[in-house]
Amino acid sequence: MSETLPLFPLGTVLYPGLLLPLHIFEDRYRQLVRDLQAGPEPRRFGVVAIREGRETGVNGVSALYEIGCTATLRRITEHEDGRFDLITVGTQRFRLASELDHSQPYLQGEVDLIDEETGAEAEAALAAQAVQRGFRAYLDALAARGVTQISVPELPDEPVVLSYLVAASVIADLTDKQALLAEPDALSRLTAERAMLSREAAMLRSLT
């Protein structure tokens, strides 16, 4: 299913089910929020990571990644000077389907929404168990090196949910984060995460 969405390029990756707070101060994105407020529910826009360029500035964005994620507005706080604070949640992945539309102050694009697939269910369930173990070992390695202290008393068993939670939580480069978003299904994503977690935990343990 295709639709046209306003786009919000960012230097980060949004995953389905994850919260994304945003502070809106540029005029073009103030206009985007006002347009969303004037439109019907659900009020949503596309978040897509920047491949080349910057979020702000004169030159701005020169290239975007192909796969992004819709962000649905959950709360809007408007300030007296016209700035906004937003709470959004990632909803569904999409693929940019056409050239970007520059007719508005902000970018727009036609997108194809991507259905969530688990992959082979039995294999995905086993991969989820392996990633749960690998993620806890990774967090322990981070804590042992004083990088961070995270308490995760219970991880989800559902492969899709777990795959996005781990993807959002792991410390990785933008290209790695984007590659996880672009995986075709949860099994593929969990398989990639298992290798990534093993590699990163081993690297952390080797540090003095």
Image: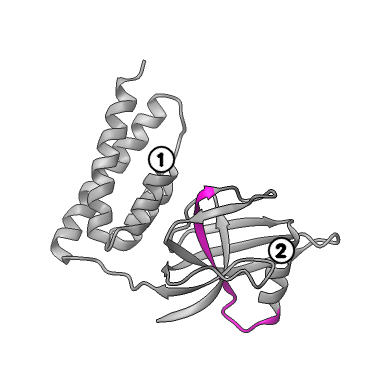
Query: Dot 2: few (<14), some (14–19), or many (≥20) neighbours within 10 Å?
Result: few
Count the numbered circles shown.
2
Left or right of residue 164, residue 23 in this image: right
For the record, the magenta segment spans: 38-52
- Colour scheme: one colour
Q: Residue 129 location, x and y as percent?
A: 21, 51
Which amino acid, mark 2? Arg
Indicate which label's residue lies in the foreground, 1 or 2: 2
| Residue 1 or residue 200, whichever sits in front | 1
Query: Dot 1: few (<14), some (14–19), or many (≥20) neighbours within 10 Å?
Result: few
Which amino acid, mark 1? Ala
In the image, residue 122 above or below residue 52:
below
Q: Residue 101 location, x and y as percent?
A: 57, 71
Q: Residue at x 52, y 77 (%)?
A: 4
The numbered mark at residue 172 is 1
Q: Residue 151 location, x and y as percent?
A: 43, 41
| Residue 155 or residue 73, whichever sits in front | 73
Give the residue at mark 2.
Answer: 28
The numbered mark at residue 12 is none
Q: CA distance from mark 1 to mark 2?
A: 30 Å
